[in-house]
Amino acid sequence: NVAHCNVVLRHSPTTLHDAALAHVARHAAAGGGLCVVSYCDGKATLLGYLLQAGVHIRRYLSVECDAHCNRLARTLYGSACEGLEPSALRFFGDARDLTVAKLKALDCHPVHLLASSTPCQDLSRCKDVHKTAEASGLEGEHSRLFVDFASRLLPALRADNRGVPLAVFAENVIPAQRVHGS
């Protein structure tokens, strides 16, 4: 269940604790602000929350393939916003093509915060009303981006982030319940 998963994550060796988060904050401040990569960003809602919280953003990479979402993000945050550097907002279309080398080429490295909001239909109790099959978990077609994020991009970035601890924020959904034998 979600509560148990959160307890386990708090005690994980990969969880950033207070000292590591303070190091991330100091590094970000020294470099002119936070560098955020938002994988499957949608309409850049995370950027809005960070700005409302008063976080200074040096670079925000919206990794999103939906042109309508990108246009909305540009409309909301493309001009001068308090806390957002003028050239901070960047876009990248195909999440599966994102690599550390491309992050460096886009001047989005090192990353302070890596966020993920991948499609979760196959992981969640919330399924399409027209779909009759049960959610199929990580093996489902809608889970490919989460698997790619967790098994390819995240480890590569942890291995090559110029020594800067990486804060990771991933969407947490209530898993689908399966009843076996009845």
Image (tube, grey):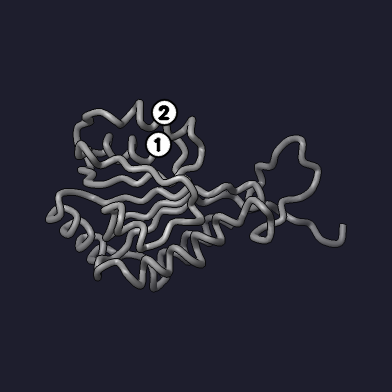
Q: Position of residue 12 (x, y in %)?
A: 42, 70
Residue at 33%, 35% (x, y): give it.
Answer: 48
Query: What amino acid is labelled 2 in the image?
Result: Leu
Tell me the CA gap for discs 2 and 1: 10 Å
Instruction: Give the residue drawn at x 49%, y 49%.
Output: 94
- Residue 30, image x and y in percent? 12, 56
Q: Nearer the viewer, mark 2 or mark 1?
A: 2
Q: Residue furthest front?
A: 105
Left or right: residue 171 versus residue 86 is right
Residue at screen point 60% across, 57% down: 144
Asked whether disc 2 touches disc 1, contact meaning CB atoms under 8 Å apart, the reply is no
Q: Which residue is mark 2?
A: 72
Viewport quadrant of the N terminus: bottom right
Q: Residues within 10 Å of mark 1 (few under 14, many from 20)?
A: few
Give the quarter of the image for residue 179: bottom right
Task: Give the amino acid at mark 1.
Answer: Thr
The quarter of the image holding the C terminus is bottom right
Above or below residue 182? Residue 121 is: above
Q: Position of residue 175 (x, y in %)?
A: 63, 53
Q: Which mark is residue 45?
A: 1
Sequence-earlier tag: 2 or 1: 1
